[in-house]
Amino acid sequence: MAINRCNKQTQTAALKKILKRCSSLGKKNSVDDENYLPADVPRGHFAVYVGENRSRYIIPIAFLSRPEFQSLLQRAEEEFGFDHEMGLTLPCEEVHFRSLLR
């Protein structure tokens, strides 16, 4: 049980890092800042990349609490890991992902 809790804490820390990098959380105004965030991501949202073509979607942070989305995050961690520069990549087809947005 302690291993599961530790893994969950590690996953939570990695998600927070990704969210800061690809969302409006902690948005900086300086373009020179290495943590500069895209201006097209509204406050309370973050970017994900989905499908074979890595299409970009801007989704609300509230999606993180949905069980279907949590399952995708777990698969993303297993397949891609959370420690890479390209934002959050989700391992699913765009059609399936769009159905989760409804």
Image (cartoon, rainbow, N blue to C red):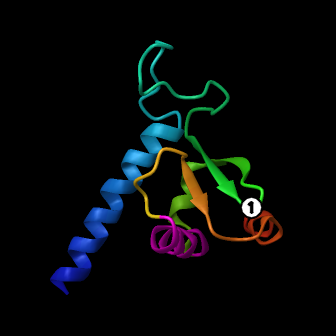
- The quarter of the picture where the N terminus appears is bottom left
Residue 51 figure quarter? bottom right
Image point (76%, 70%), residue name: 93
Nearer the observer, 59 or 22? 22
Judge from the rendering whether residue 39 lies leftward or rightward of residue 75; answer left or right.
Answer: right
**From this viewpoint, which residue is outermost toward the bottom?**
1
Nearer the observer, 102 or 75? 75
Q: Which region of the structure is painted magenta? A: 68-80
Judge from the rendering whether residue 35 lies leftward or rightward of residue 97; answer left or right.
Answer: left
Residue 2 figure quarter? bottom left
Image point (71%, 48%), residue name: 57
Q: Is residue 98 above or below residue 87?
A: below
Counting every numbered tag in the picture gives: 1
Q: Is residue 30 above or below residue 84?
A: above
Judge from the rendering whether residue 44 lies leftward or rightward of residue 6; answer left or right.
Answer: right
- The quarter of the picture where the C terminus appears is bottom right
**From this viewpoint, which residue is outermost toward the left?**
2
Q: Residues within 10 Å of mark 1 (few under 14, many from 20)?
A: few
SS at circle 1: loop
**From this viewpoint, which residue is outermost toward the right?**
95
The amino acid beneath tag 1 is: Leu
Image point (53%, 40%), residue name: 22
**Residue 25 coordinates in the image, percent (x, y):** 46, 35
Q: Which residue is mark 1?
A: 101
**Residue 41 coordinates in the image, percent (x, y):** 63, 33
Q: Is residue 56 magenta?
A: no
Magenta region, main secondary structure: helix
Nearer the observer, 42 or 15? 15
Q: Is residue 42 above or below residue 91?
A: above
